[in-house]
Structures are given as structure tokens and as C-alpha cells.
Image (spheres, helix red, strand yellow):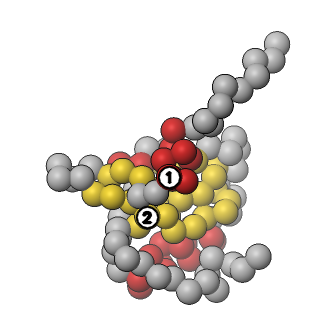
Amino acid sequence: MTSPLDQKIKITGPVVVTANRVGDGAVVYRRADGGWSTRLPEAAVTSNVATAREFIAAAVADDLRAVGPYIAPVKLTADGGVQPGNLRELIRLGGPTIDLPVTF
């Protein structure tokens, strides 16, 4: 598998960096201050390739808190909100699409 740093970055609109939290696997989004959040509206959004490259490089280096970072498309709403930009990110944000078995 190719490292996110070695991949050619092609951006056609706003994007965020997303990954999975190490402790529990939760979906997280990179914030502008370098931290991680489980809330998409708190993610740092860019449409600039150079900035996206900086975001992904910092996220890859932060492998003690989050793993598997990649650049994901988002849509900006008229009121300044952020929504997932494709079906994959909509599913990741909303959780599993099936009922998980209950274990006792």
C-alpha cells in the first residue's frame, strides 16, 4: 500500500483529513490546531493542494492518536456547515449500516 505522503493529491473541491482513533477505532477528523475531533464540523477544511499535503503529513506523523489518515471530500453548505462529500464518508460518519449483534 502506498503511503498517503507518496500519493498524488488531486483536489477538485473542499477536503478534510480523516482517520481512525487508535484507542477505539472511532472516525476522527483533523482540526486546524492539530488535534482530532469526532465531529466533522470541527475539521480543518481546505481546497488547496499544498495545505492538504501539510495536513496529511502532520496526520501521518501523529500515529499514536490516529491511524490510516487520508484526504476525504466534503461539501460546504450555504450556512457554512460541513457535510460528507461522498457515500463512503456519509457511512463512516453515521456508523454501520446494519444492526450490530448485542453481546452480553
Residue 29 left/right relative to 76? right
- Across and down, in percent, residue 73 comes to 43, 64
**Residue 33 visible in the current orientation:** no
Pick the front one: 75 or 31? 75
Q: Residue furthest top?
A: 104
Residue 94 left/right relative to 11? right
Q: Amino acid at mark 1?
A: Leu
Vertically, is 64 above or below 1?
above
Q: Residue furthest right?
A: 104
Q: Residue furthest left?
A: 79
Q: Secondary structure at mark 1?
A: helix
Pick the front one: 86 or 5? 86
Whole-angstrom CA distance, mark 1 to mark 2, is 10 Å
Name the quarter where the N terminus is drawn. bottom right
Residue 2 left/right relative to 71? right
Mark 2: give few (<14), some (14-19) or many (20+) Cα within 10 Å: many
Mark 1: give few (<14), some (14-19) or many (20+) Cα within 10 Å: few
Q: Amino acid at mark 2?
A: Pro
Residue 74 left/right relative to 94? left
- Across and down, in percent, residue 56 comes to 53, 73
Residue 11 image-quadrant placement? bottom left
The residue at the point 65 percent across, 31 percent down is 98
Q: Secondary structure at mark 2?
A: strand
Q: How many marks?
A: 2
The residue at the point 48 percent across, 72 percent down is 55
Does the residue at mark 1 contact the one at mark 2 (Cβ under 8 Å)?
no
Q: Which residue is mark 2?
A: 73
Q: Which residue is mark 1?
A: 87
- Across and down, in percent, residue 21 comes to 64, 49
